[in-house]
């Protein structure tokens, strides 16, 4: 009987009955000014970053909702306006230690940026965001911050932590759309951190631009074993928009890959004056005879700085020396 009595008492308190000696709990849980707890927020704000992996080109639609939460039901219809908040990019990058670029304006559209939460309801009809990767300048990633910018009933607060949703768009190519490599005929190597100068194995950086698979840029191994990074600066003679490159490893005479010296991690930078450089990204490459990489963001410049930061010494090890047969840029 004692257990049943306790359960009955607990149920009465939760449901607001009057069985106990205390006062009943009203429909607002005895909270003073219950309307002050009402908030509008973005439903996608709960999800953290919303990552969209898309091929280039691809067209897709994602949906967003405005939501209402609080102690009292919504007593009137509320219209909520969404906008792309470009000003949030810098703050986002600072907080997340990223260098994302904004998704270009011509790659997205908010097809109905005003939605309505009907009275008595907690969610709106969906808002459509159309994203098209056909025009993105490189695989990215790109950021699209979408925020609540206006609420028709200004007495209802917006939950600041859930005001915005962050879409991260990461592109990829099913095949290389840049089929023509740049003409390297007049290119010149301006500097090179190291190469082998011994007569029997003279391997300057110019040899990775000569079109001959049997020659290669080989960094110094005697009398000193020079460790990476191995850096060379190339004058392409005019400003070029670079989309990516192809790196061919040193080959044996039979065409097989030499088992060490392949570029494992490379960094690309571009400049128009050989003094002020734009970082075009660092890229990890598989252990292959030839690798193609795409710049995260298409970058322009006359001068190309090519840095081999780490080298393979076989598939599962590393090596101090770089040996690169050809470097093509597209």
Image (cartoon, helix red, strand yellow):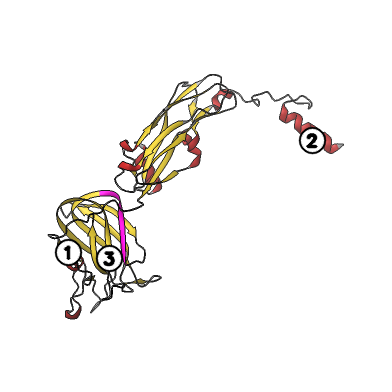
Range drawn in magenta:
289-298
Task: Tell me what residue is drawn at x 83 percent, y 36 percent.
Answer: 4
Compared across the picture, whether 84 is left or right of 32 comes to left
Residue that numbered label 2 is attached to: 7
Task: Tell me what residue is drawn at x 57 percent, y 28 percent.
Answer: 70
Quadrant for residue 1, please give it. Answer: top right
Neighbour tally class for label 3: few under 14, some 14-19, many 20 plus, Cα within 10 Å: many
Q: Nearer the viewer, mark 3 or mark 2?
A: 3
Residue that numbered label 1 is attached to: 191
Neighbour tally class for label 2: few under 14, some 14-19, many 20 plus, Cα within 10 Å: few
* Residue situated in front as seen by the camera: 70 or 134: 134
* Residue situated in front as seen by the camera: 50 or 137: 137
Main secondary structure along the magenta-highlighted residues: strand
| Residue positioned most to the right | 1
> In the rendered structure, which disc, 1 or 2, sits on the residue that comes first in sequence?
2
The answer to whether the residues at label 1 and label 2 have Cβ atoms under 8 Å apart is no
> In the rendered structure, which disc, 3 or 2, sits on the residue that comes first in sequence?
2
Q: Is residue 287 above or below residue 295?
A: below
Total numbered badges shown on the rendered structure: 3
Is residue 296 located in the magenta-colored stretch of the structure? yes
Q: Is residue 204 above or below residue 198?
A: above
- Helix, strand or loop at label 2? It is helix
Compared across the picture, whether 117 is left or right of 318 comes to right
Quadrant for residue 192, please give it. Answer: bottom left
Compared across the picture, whether 165 is left or right of 13 comes to left
> In the rendered structure, which disc, 3 or 1, sits on the residue that comes first in sequence?
1
Compared across the picture, whether 119 is left or right of 310 comes to right
* Residue situated in front as seen by the camera: 52 or 87: 52
CA distance for labels 3 and 1: 20 Å
CA distance for labels 3 and 2: 76 Å
Residue that numbered label 3 is attached to: 248
């Amino acid at each position: 009987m004692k257990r049943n009595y306790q359960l009955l008492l607990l149920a009465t308190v939760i449901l607001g009955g009057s069985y106990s000696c205390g006062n009943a709990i009203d429909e607002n849980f005895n909270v003073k000014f219950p309307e002050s707890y009402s908030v509008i927020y973005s439903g996608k704000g709960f999800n953290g970053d919303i990552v969209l992996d898309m091929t280039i080109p691809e067209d897709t639609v994602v949906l967003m909702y405005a939501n209402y939460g609080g102690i009292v039901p919504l007593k009137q219809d509320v219209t909520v306006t969404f906008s792309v908040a470009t000003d949030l990019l810098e703050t986002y990058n600072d907080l997340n230690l990223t260098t994302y670029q904004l998704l270009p304006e011509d790659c997205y559209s908010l097809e109905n940026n005003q939605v309505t939460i009907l009275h008595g309801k907690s969610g709106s009809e969906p808002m459509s965001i159309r994203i098209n990767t056909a025009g993105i300048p490189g695989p990215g990633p790109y950021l699209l911050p979408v925020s609540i910018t206006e609420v028709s009933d200004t007495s209802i607060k917006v939950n600041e932590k859930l005001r915005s949703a962050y879409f991260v768009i990461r592109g990829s190519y099913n095949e290389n759309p840049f089929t023509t490599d740049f003409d390297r005929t007049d290119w010149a190597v301006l500097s090179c951190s190291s190469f082998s100068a011994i007569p029997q194995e003279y391997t300057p950086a110019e040899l990775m631009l000569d079109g001959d698979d049997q020659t290669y840029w080989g960094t110094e191994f005697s009398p000193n074993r020079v460790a990476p990074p191995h850096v060379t600066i190339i004058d392409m003679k005019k400003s070029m928009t670079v989309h990516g490159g192809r790196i061919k490893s040193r080959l044996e005479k039979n065409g097989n890959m030499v088992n060490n010296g392949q570029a494992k991690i490379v960094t690309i930078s571009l400049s128009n004056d050989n003094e002020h450089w734009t970082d075009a990204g660092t890229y990890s490459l598989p252990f292959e005879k030839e690798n193609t990489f795409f710049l995260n963001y298409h970058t322009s410049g006359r001068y190309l700085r090519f840095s081999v930061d780490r080298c393979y010494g076989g598939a599962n090890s590393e090596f101090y020396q770089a040996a690169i047969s050809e470097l093509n840029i597209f």
